[in-house]
Image (tube, helix red, strand yellow):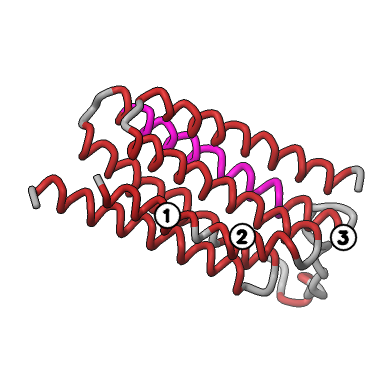
Amino acid sequence: MSQWVVASVALLAGLLPCAVVCLRGDACSRLVGLEMAGTVDTLVLVLLAEVYQRAIYFDLAVALALLSFAGGMVFARFLERFL
Amino acid sequence: MTPRGVAVAILLAVGVGVELFCCVGVLVMRDLYDKLHYTAPATTIGSLAIAAAVVVQESFSQAGIKAILVFLILLVTNPVLSHATARAARVRELGHWEPRPRRRRPRRDRGQEGVP
């Protein structure tokens, strides 16, 4: 079971480069960092659900995958049209 | 270590490695359009490997099916999202996202080459 813990902690370290991307550059580059962070977060939730052995926790990953897509689309549309 | 444990470890290593590589790639690349390329392997190879690890561990139980569902959602939604992001960047850059007008080549006059 410990390999799942190791994998989820290692994957959490991938959020640091995404945070750096979100903090510099122009607005659209920051949006790319946000999308990447959403993907990594979804997979971290999958791994943590496997760590805790609860099948219901996988629903969190499904919800985050759908909502990060919706959020990214809203950001892209606003950057394109209104900002 | 059982064969199942070895398979899970290999799949997790591949998935986490691809994800970390893509995060570093997004950080290192200079341009927005170069950065966008690195979101593709994170949602195809990386999430496929992690979902496969969950399926190998749990077989096709509730957890395995939901992991496959997460993989399918990421696989379908990421191209749409990267297209929308690239289009937004191009609209902010040019004001529209149609291709640039093609420069017309000077046409050779057909009448000189002999009319059939």
Tell me which amino acid carries mark 1. Val
Distance in Å between CA atoms under marks 2 and 1? 15 Å
**Which residue was labeled with disc 1?**
A9
Q: Which chain does the residue under circle 1 lie in? A: A
- Disc 1, SS: helix
Residue A72 included in the magenta stretch of the image: no
Left or right of B44 in this view: B64:
left
Q: Dividing the picture into quarters, in which one does residue A77 lie?
A: top right
Q: Give the range drawn in magenta.
A: B65-86
Q: Which chain does the residue under circle 2 lie in? A: A
Residue B60: image x %, image y %?
A: 24, 27
Residue B83: image x %, image y %?
A: 65, 48
Judging depth in this view, the residue of B24 and B115 nearest the camera is: B24
Q: Residue at x 78, y 75 (%)?
A: B108
Q: Which residue is drawn at 50% across and 30% down?
A: A60
Position of the N terminus of chain A, as image quadrant, is top left
Tell me which amino acid carries mark 3. Leu
Q: Which mark is residue A18?
A: 2
Tell me which amino acid carries mark 2. Cys
